[in-house]
Image (cartoon, coloured by chain):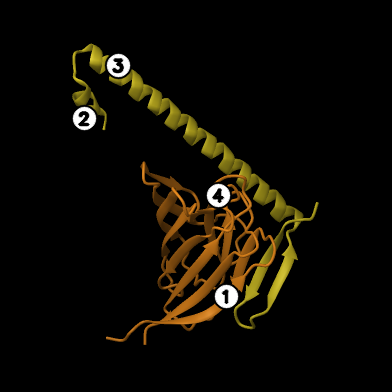
Chain colours: A orange, B yellow
Amino acid sequence: MPTPTYVAIAKQVMTGTQATITFSAIPSTYTDLVVLGSVRTDRASTVDYLKIRFNGASVDTNLTGRFIYGDGATATSSTAAYAQVARVDAASNTSNTFSNVEIYIPNYLGSTYKPISSSGVAEDNSTTGYDQASASLFSDTTAISSISLVNLFGSFVSGTRFDLYGIKNS
Amino acid sequence: MDKPTKLIVDCSTGEQTVVELSSDEIAQLEADRAAAEAQRAEQEAAETAKAAKRLTAADKLRALGLEEEEVAALLS
């Protein structure tokens, strides 16, 4: 059985505040895509919510999400008419603390709807962590050629980093 | 105040471009954030109301003679 191989497509470390980031012209030479993130936003709160969009959309079109969430004390679940892929650190959380995020997009070139699995933790590196796991769906049969990441409330701050990988099944 | 910007990374060339959001994009972003704030407030209100109902339910169960552990078991 072939061993799946991660191939780095692009990486971006932000040097200023950005409302969104888009990876465009994604090569069509892989089977799956993975986005890894180290994320913090300027929302005046401890947490913000990272969303994903595809193919140049500036609105949450053909996207739905189901997610579970726990902070060590309570666990909840919810649905949304957008793809909320992770809870991330925001401005009121411990300084210089960034959330870890992983997003997996299988069969991104396929002509069927695309599921997205993801997880992320917004933590204060002291007492509290907000963990979220999500199952989202891009209800579109078009191949994915670009990925945009945007927060529900705030903008990405300097130091936020995203890495895009292609998975090669060989 | 500076306009918000977006960062575009072209994976075919590696070129990075910072672009100011258009008026339409800013309006959409603000609308999305306002809608999210409203939804969040609605959820929090629902959770607060649910917590209050649990308290009154617990009081009624105690009035019926249930012990504290039984009340806790029923409401867990």
Dots 2 and 1 on the same chain: no
In the foreground, A166 or A121: A121
Residue identifier under label 3: B59
User: Disc 4 vs disc 1: which is toward the camera?
Assistant: 4
Q: Residue placed at 70% from the left, 55% from the top?
A: B25
Please determine whether, in this image, residue A107 is positioned above or below residue A82: below
Tags 3 and 2 in contact by the CB under 8 Å rule? no
Q: Quadrant of the N terminus of chain A?
A: bottom left
Residue identifier under label 1: A11
Mark 1 lies on a secondary structure that is: strand
Q: Is residue A125 left or right of residue B55?
A: right
Q: Quadrant of the C terminus of chain A?
A: bottom left
Mark 3 lies on a secondary structure that is: helix
Q: Residue placed at 47% from the left, 62% from the top?
A: A101
What distance separates the C-alpha of mark 2 from that of mark 4?
35 Å
Q: Residue placed at 57% from the left, 71% from the top?
A: A146
What distance separates the C-alpha of mark 3 from that of mark 4?
37 Å
Mark 4 lies on a secondary structure that is: loop
The kind of residue on which mark 1 rests is Lys
Residue identifier under label 4: A93
The kind of residue on which mark 2 rests is Ala
**Label 2 environment density (alpha carbons within 10 Å; few <14, some 14–19, many ≥20):** few
Tags 2 and 4 in contact by the CB under 8 Å rule? no
Q: Is residue A133 left or right of residue A98?
A: left
Residue identifier under label 2: B73
What distance separates the C-alpha of mark 3 from that of mark 1?
57 Å
Q: Chain of mark 3?
A: B
The kind of residue on which mark 4 rests is Asn
Q: Is residue B70 left or right of residue A147?
A: left
Is residue A26 in view from this perspective? Answer: no
